[in-house]
Image (cartoon, rainbow, N blue to C red):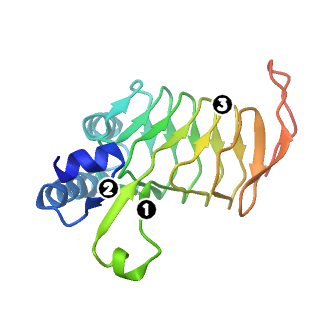
Amino acid sequence: MTEKEKLLAGLPYDATDPELLRELNECKDIIHQYNRLMPSKRAERTAMLKSLLGHVGDDNIFINQPFYCDYGSNISVGKRFFANFNFTVLDEARVTIGDDCFVGPNVSIYTACHSTDPMERNSRREWGEPVTIGDNVWIGGNVTILPGVTIGDNVTIGAGSVVTHDIPSNVVAVGNPCRVIKSIPTGGQGSDDVK
């Protein structure tokens, strides 16, 4: 089994593997080009994102620059995806984001995991745990989503939250660690805005 196959299977792998380092650098080159494109070059930006990411639901994808990711190919976004400035995705495992998701500025999604044992960590072996985000999710600014988390549909994550565990559908969740503070009515009745 290659180190890339181990990465994709969620197994510990050697982060210094030449094939993985080559792919990381290729992605960084593309991201560098993307971040230097004129913001008015919408069609070019969309085309570049569609070639970089593993799956894009439609042409209505918009990621404000700068944007950062490790591989790109492990990221899947649904229809009408929007992310604001400084969106960072460490996609050492799959990151799956549903339709109609809004991501505020300075949001980070991490899938990369490292040992808490310093000797083991220094061996440069790591693994990834996937992150899944449902449909109709709003993630406020400065949110951090940790490895292995699943966020359900119709969720609002309040600004500054650190999401350390799964969040069910149809709720507002905030804090560090992020926790559910209220349910969201379903059926389009609306609810109070959360700042």
Residue pointed to by mark 1: 113
Sequence-wise, which precedes: disc 2 or disc 1? 2
- Residue at 47% over, 28% down: 78
Residue pointed to by mark 2: 70
Residue pointed to by mark 3: 153
Please tell me how crowded label 3 is: few (under 14), some (14-19), or many (20+) other residues with Cα within 10 Å: many
Q: CA distance from mark 2 to mark 1?
A: 14 Å
Tell whether 49 sits left or right of 157.
Answer: left
**Residue 163: where, in percent of width, then height?**
64, 55
Sequence-wise, which precedes: disc 3 or disc 2? 2
Q: In this figure, what is the number of numbered marks?
A: 3
Quarter assignment of residue 112? bottom left
- Residue at 32% over, 39% down: 53
- Residue at 34% over, 63% down: 126
Vertical relation: 147 (above or below) 132: below
Vertical relation: 169 (above or below) 179: above
Residue type for callout 2: Asp
Choose mark 1 or mark 3, whichever is in front: 1
In the picture, the disc for residue 163 is none
Vertical relation: 125 (above or below) 64: below
Closer to the camera, 27 or 18? 18
**Residue 37: where, in percent of width, then height?**
29, 51
Closer to the camera, 169 or 187? 169
Choose mark 2 or mark 1, whichever is in front: 1
**Residue 154: where, in percent of width, then height?**
69, 31
- Residue at 29% over, 56% down: 36
Residue type for callout 3: Asp
Could you tell me if the residues under marks 3 and 2 are in contact, i.e. CB atoms within 8 Å?
no
Residue type for callout 1: Cys
- Name the secondary structure under disc 1: strand
Sequence-wise, which precedes: disc 1 or disc 3? 1
